[in-house]
Amino acid sequence: MKKTFYLMRHGQTLFNLRRKMQGHCDSPLTELGRKQAEVAGEYLKNIEIDHAYSSSLERCCDTLEIATNESIPYTRLKGLKEMNFGVFEGESEDLKPLDKKDYENFFVKYGGESLSQVKERMLKTCTEIMEKDDHNTVLAVSHGLASLCFLSNFEDTDEMMKKGIPNCTIFKYEYENKEFKLIEIIRHDFSEIEEALAY
C-alpha cells in the first residue's frame, strides 16, 4: 500500500536571521518565521493528515503548531533533530567549511555529527514512522540540513546543499515497501509577507 510522507523545514528563526549555526541548540521563530508557517498551513489544510511528528526542538514544534492551527496532536522525536555542530553551536555561519564536502566529518572532532550519521538517523526515524499501522498520510517537521541528508539517501543533493532550502519548504514523498520516492518539492512564495514586514 502506498503512503504519503510530508517532510517540512521549520520557519525562519532568530539564528537564521543572525546567521548563526543552530543544530541541536535552538532559537525562536521570528515574526516572518511564524508567517511562513501560516503560509505552509494554507497548503497543508487541504490534506487529510492522520499523524504528525516534529523534531524535539522548539522551532519545529512551533512551526507545526502554527501550520496545523494546533488541530493535530503530534509526537516529538529526537531522531528528527538537525545535525549537531558540536562546539560550533551558536557560532557564526562564517566558521562553516567553505566546501560542503568538508561537512562530512568536519564537526565530528568538535563533538558534532557527520553527514552520514544524520543521513542514517533520519532514514531510520522516518522509516520507523511510516512502518506504523494506520500511518497513511504523515507530516513531519524537521530542519534544512537534516531534510537534505534524508533526501540524499535517494537522490543527488549536491546543488541543493550548496544553495540550501528555503524555510518551510515541504518535501512530498511516496512510501511503499520500505522505500521512499520523492514526488514533489513545495516551495512557497513569501514575497508579499516579506514586503509587508519590511515596512
Image (spheres, rainbow, N blue to C red):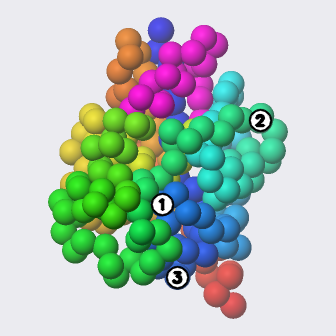
Assign a secondary structure to mark 2. Answer: loop
Q: Residue at x 79, y 47 (%)?
A: 69
Specify the farthest residue to the bottom: 199
Highlighted magenta segment, given as a residue range: 123-139
Q: Residue at x 61, y 75 (%)?
A: 14
Assign a secondary structure to mark 3. Answer: loop
Distance (Cα) linking label 2 and label 1? 26 Å
**Residue 161, relative to residue 173: is it above or below?**
below
Q: Which residue is mark 1?
A: 23
Give the mark nearest the N terminus, 2 or 1: 1
Q: Is residue 138 magenta?
A: yes
Distance (Cα) linking label 1 and label 3? 14 Å
Query: Front-most of 123 and 191?
Result: 123
Q: Check residue 72 in the rendering and tell me which mark sits there, or answer none.
A: 2
Task: Identify the amino acid type marked 3.
Answer: Arg
Task: Identify the amino acid type marked 2.
Answer: Ile
Give the mark nearest the N terminus, 2 or 3: 3
**Residue 92, relative to residue 158: is it above or below?**
below
Where in the figure is residue 146, as x and y percent of width and height?
42, 49
Local crowd size for mark 1, using a 10 Å CA cut-off: few (<14), some (14–19), many (≥20) = many
Where in the figure is residue 57, as x and y percent of width and height?
62, 53
